[in-house]
Image (spheres, rainbow, N blue to C red):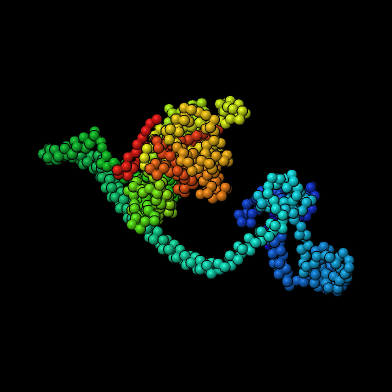
Amino acid sequence: MEKLDRLLRSASLRRSFGGRGSISSPGWRRSSVTPRVTTFPCPGCQHDIDLGERGISMLFRNFTLESIVERYRQAARAAVAIMCNVCKPPVQEATKSCMDCKASFCNECFKMNHPWGTPKAQHEYVGPTTNFRPKVLMCPEHEMEKVNMYCEVCRRPVCHLCKLGGSHANHRVTSMSSAYKILKEKLSKSIHYLISKEDQVRTQISELEVLIRHTEENGQLAERRTSEHFERLLEALQERRTEMLRSIEQSRSLRVERLRTQVEEYQGMLENSGLVGYAQEVLKETDQSCFVQTAKLLHVRIQKATDSLKTFQTAAAPSFEEFVLDTSKEELLLKELSFSGVPEPPVIDLSRCRVYNEGLIHWHLSEDSLPTDHHIVEFRKLGSEEESGWRASEPVFGCSTVLSDLSAGSRYTFRVKSCRNGVYSPSSPEVTLHTPPAPVFGFLFNEKCGFSAERLQLSKRRDSVESVAGMSLLLAAERVQTGSYICLDYIIGDTGISHGRHYWAFRVQPDSYMIKVGVASDSKLTEWFHNPRDTSSPRYDHDSGHDSGSEDTCFEVSQPFTLVTVGMGRLFIPKASASAAGDHGSRVLPMPQRIGVCLDYDAGRVFFYDADTMRCLYERPVDCSGTMYPAFGLLGGGAVHLEEFITAKRLFTPSGFTLIHTQI
């Protein structure tokens, strides 16, 4: 209630001091000239919130909250009875309030004003109240229309004009009754779930209270320890201060004493004092023998005084430069003084991690964390009892490392911890990565074998190829009009496979039109590159993913190539594999961010994987009678990028296993 009153006062002040309007209650029919408040103070942070041009009138009324507020108001006014608005004196206490008449009545007056058989008998009445605002929710955009639909996209009530030509024209809407049932059911389930978890909540509250107590105790202990550290620092500083001030005082006293002695010596040279006065008295001596005896020694003293005047030099230097104290380093250390206890744990960056025969692990620290000395990466193999222990890497001084000796087709868990001043942080959250089912096969794109420089653009490193849907594709439209199909532009890897199991991975640009990926033998490549025909069209290929029907007739025949179609954000499983993949709908899958291909040459099978999760998407037999090559076919706009581990040609094969590379 205080917040509501503050809101009303704020609106009144704006109106008094030239504000932009007054509050108008949504749900009432409003005049177009009524000024509106476009900002109001947030009850939490007290900052002004801008509501736009329509102000508070753009907001919906929360009738549920109004009912709750009204109940609290009635409870607050329980001691003050609501009187009948129709009774003649003496006025009776009201027992009912009519929402249509907007008045309160006692029993007798209610019967008189709402007789049976009249339209007033159908009025809605409630208990005694002063809140007669109608429960009719009006559309904030169309002020004369009631809301009767629910927009599932914006998740808000709308009227029929909003759906016909307003901002919700293309949105999916449902009836208000359906939305009411669905939302009420969801809310009921949520409430029942919370009620069923009452014991768990109480247990967690107890745990939190224990944690609060421990936090307070540990905080007080940390405060005492910190105070002790600073007290020791203050004591050390005070000791050093006393010693250094004592040294300065001793040097000052010694120098002042020497200078005062020199002053006394020079004062003796003055007339009527000291040496000069004594010499004048000696000159008055008339006895020659006595004068000679005294004047000889006196002359030596006067000669020394004369020489000292010619070579005047102070007995001590007034400067104290040797006592200048440089505390800049210490001040910097004190300013950087912080809690150098347990460092914060790092976080592994999954988007940059890659696992093949080796594991490339990246991580990062929080922005406000202090520099660390080094990091330790720990990993273990899952699903194997003899290898269930954690293995640690050598100290890493950067934020990434490469881990070797990983088994193929296995799941590994990785974690990282930081070290500073010999203290290790807690381990980072664990991440699980799956290694490929076979050793990595390294290759680059071959630009010398059937490469179409007109329609394909190859990068300088030959690790990515892009298809350009330009003038050449438009010129080929004449073939489309005659019933033919446009041929795919094929490109292959520069290294072939003649036996063994191999794995490679690549990324297909998400906005690619159509790209076919897989393997092909040297015999099929000769047919593709040297005898180009329209049968290379997407419709003719058995693995194109198109509904031509040709896949069903040739599935059992082992072909010298296997290609899977990827494009338009999807991966198309060939029709012949529907029995293995399930229903027809499962043939169209979302395009993975990275696609992996595994060729088992000896078994004559090829596998296609989601390279991020190592989930097998599709497999089928392939005729491996010749040398097999990674093959790619591009049509329209699109691009293929090989993974860095693949293009680096880092082939880590088991002992006794050799790859045979054949150039076309």
186 lies above or below 305: below
Q: Residue at x 70, y 61 (%)?
A: 64
Side of 272 where 633 appears, left or right: right
Nearest the eye: 147 or 660: 660
Side of 31 where 238 appears, left or right: left
Q: Residue at x 12, y 40 (%)?
A: 293
**Quarter of the figure with the C terminus:** top left
The image position of residue 181, as x and y in percent, is 68, 60
Marker count (numbered) = 0
The image position of residue 286, as x and y in percent, is 15, 38
The image position of residue 294, as x and y in percent, is 14, 40
Q: Residue at x 42, y 33 (%)?
A: 522
**Quarter of the figure with the N terminus:** bottom right
Can residue 291 be seen at all in this image of the molecule?
Answer: no
The image position of residue 561, as x and y in percent, is 46, 37
Q: Residue at x 52, y 49 (%)?
A: 579
Side of 259 where 92 appears, left or right: right
Can residue 174 be seen at all in this image of the molecule?
Answer: yes
Nearest the eye: 209 or 618: 618
